[in-house]
Amino acid sequence: MALQELIFERSALRLADCPKEPWPEVAISGRSNVGKSSLLNRIAGRKALAKVSQTPGKTRMLNFFRFEVQARLVDLPGYGFARVPPAMQDEWRRCMSEYLAERAQLAGIIQIVDSRHAPTELDQQMVGWMRHRRLPFLLVLTKADKIKRGERAKAKAEARRSLELPADQACLFFSAETGEGKREVLSWIAQALAGWRPDPLS
């Protein structure tokens, strides 16, 4: 799968505005400013495919990126305490809830957590929802270049404990700066997309 061919397609704030083709999608989820757009840019080999900002809340809509192989990545709005009006935060939550609950094309989620910090309550809620829905997901601990090698085992164990992950749940470190974890993320995306099957009732 050549992610260099990934191109921005459209943004959407309602399910009705999402692309109509029945193509599988992998969504990228995480709290505001955790590094979703940076991960997307790194795995695509593009510096500015997705907008990156130091200000939480830069991604305010569902952003769809299309492959030539009839599949998509979706950059989700970050959850948490973004510096935006409460009304806009409510709109984001509605948009996220609608997409995650009703989007039939959703094949899996890349769930991002900052490796330097314990998962938040919102991270726990998100992972709990995915497990309840039996939706495939990959836990990615970002900003791995900012944590010492000797502290990694402890950080991963804490994330697994906090999120109540089973032993076989995929979890890896990733660095947008060095590219660590890129190959593994790409492999997981390819597997999730290949494993998706359309709902015969939809």
Image (cartoon, rainbow, N blue to C red):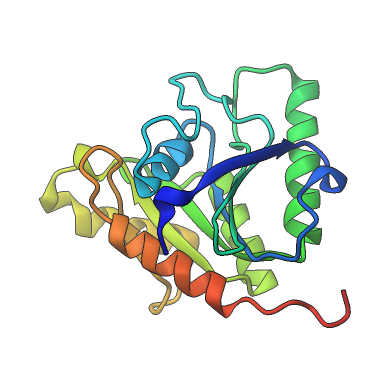
Q: Is residue 146 above or below residue 71?
A: above
Q: Position of residue 99 (x, y in %)?
A: 76, 52
Total count of labels: 0
Residue shown at 80%/55% (left/top)?
20
Residue shown at 50%/54% (left/top)?
111
Identify the image quadrant of residue 102.
Answer: bottom right
Q: Is residue 22 above or below residue 112?
A: below
66 vs 155, left or right, is: right
Q: Position of residue 178 (x, y in %)?
A: 20, 42
Tell which of 200 and 31 is nearer to you.
200
* Residue furthest left in the image: 150
Q: Is residue 116 above or below residue 47?
A: below
Identify the image quadrant of residue 158.
Answer: bottom left
Residue shown at 21%/37% (left/top)?
146
In what quadrant of the picture does the C terminus appear?
Answer: bottom right
Residue 165 appears in the figure? no
201 vs 31, left or right, is: right
* Residue furthest bottom in the image: 200
Identify the image quadrant of residue 183.
Answer: bottom left
In what quadrant of the picture does the N terminus appear?
Answer: bottom left
159 vs 32, left or right, is: left
Residue shown at 46%/50% (left/top)?
5
Residue 24 appears in the figure? yes
Q: Position of residue 101 (x, y in %)?
A: 78, 59
104 vs 136, left or right, is: right
